[in-house]
Image (cartoon, rainbow, N blue to C red):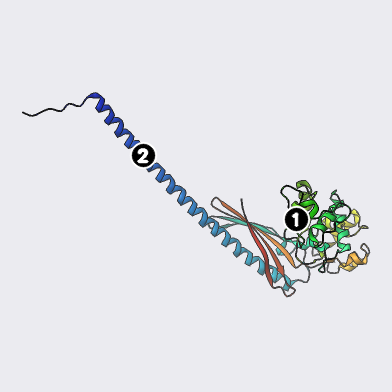
Amino acid sequence: MSKRVYISNKNKGIALITAMLIVAITGIISSNLLWDNILSTRKTMSTLNRDQAIQVAIGAENWIKQILKQDAINSATDHLNELWAKKLPKLPIDGGDISGEIIDLQSRFNINNIIQSDGTLNQNQFNQLQRLLRILHLDPNMANVIVDWIDKDQYTSYPGGAEDDIYTKMNPPYRTSNQKIITITELLSINSMSIESYKTLAPHITAVPISTQINVNTAGSVILSSLDDGVTQNDIQRLINERNPSGYADIVTSFKPLLLPENLSNISNKSNYFQLKLLVNIDSITITMFTTIKREANGNTSVINRSFGTI
């Protein structure tokens, strides 16, 4: 005789709950796998887009180097109405756009000028740095702090200087660089340099590894004012008006009446150091590339340094 098996309502409920749990867990696992796959694909695309953006920027850099070389061949001077000095407008590229500009680094005060190649103080350049600080309403004694950061000795400049005895007491402690400044952001490490002071000073200075002259065809009014104590605002306005549209071919005639002989030797109408800033957008990736370019007298160009930032 056959037997019938009866399943209680309680067992039926447990079976149903178990089945629902299995379905739910399967759904969660599937969703996680799908999400991981989406993230992995997105990361891969972002990496590919970033690599593409870098290659585009380097390609543009080579194009800019050719422009600077051709400019040296075509012109004996550098001024703000030349092709290299015009901002590069947004240009479409595959999946995005590129824009940029070239900055004449010799339109700014080279902070490394204050220490000579033999390690001694360049008093003339030091005086100009102090004038620049005064014009910007910053403490001129900050020049002494910068000297102590660059020079190789541990003798504190007076007044306001700072050597290792100051920095080693900070938290965290560190030491002076005792070498030429590589990038102007180093100034944020020196004693008494606040963020506000740095933001005020930064647009007017650069850190070229060797001594450079100021190109008066590209320098702004603040730098022109710092050339000598005798330069007035009326002089600055006249000088800027006179240099348009093609700059000074003969700087001695215009500047000799205004500058002391030792300050006249600090200026030029030609530049050898430039900074290229490029902004590349591809999809959701944006990179900035900064390249310092050296141009020789024959027009040949070389990259001194290159850095990338991601926005």
Residue drawn at (74%, 56%) of the image = 184
Q: Percent position (x, y) of residue 274?
A: 72, 64
* Nearest to viewer (mark 2 / mark 1): 1
Residue 256 occupies which quadrant of the picture? bottom right
Residue 153 occupies which quadrant of the picture? bottom right
How far apart in space, not on screen, are marks 2 and 1 (Cα)? 58 Å
Which residue type does callout 2 highlight? Answer: Gly
Residue drawn at (26%, 25%) of the image = 10
- From this viewpoint, which residue is outermost toward the top? 9
Residue 54 seen from this side: yes
Residue 254 seen from this side: no
- For the N terminus, the quadrant is top left
Q: Percent position (x, y) of residue 31?
A: 40, 42
Q: Percent position (x, y) of residue 154?
A: 82, 59
Residue 5 occupies which quadrant of the picture? top left
Residue situated in front as seen by the camera: 218 or 15:
15
Which residue type does callout 1 highlight? Answer: Arg
What SS does tag 2 mark?
helix
Vertical comparison of 278 with 199: above or below? below
Vertical comparison of 90 with 208: above or below? above
Q: Residues within 10 Å of mark 1 (few under 14, many from 20)?
A: some
What SS does tag 1 mark?
loop
How many marks are shown on the rendered structure? 2
Q: Which residue is mark 1?
A: 175
Residue situated in front as seen by the camera: 298 or 163:
163
Q: Which residue is mark 2?
A: 27
Whichever of callouts 2 and 1 sits on the residue coming sooner in the sequence is 2
Q: Percent position (x, y) of residue 150?
A: 79, 60
Image position of 120 (left or right of 95): right
- From this viewpoint, which residue is outermost toward the bottom? 298
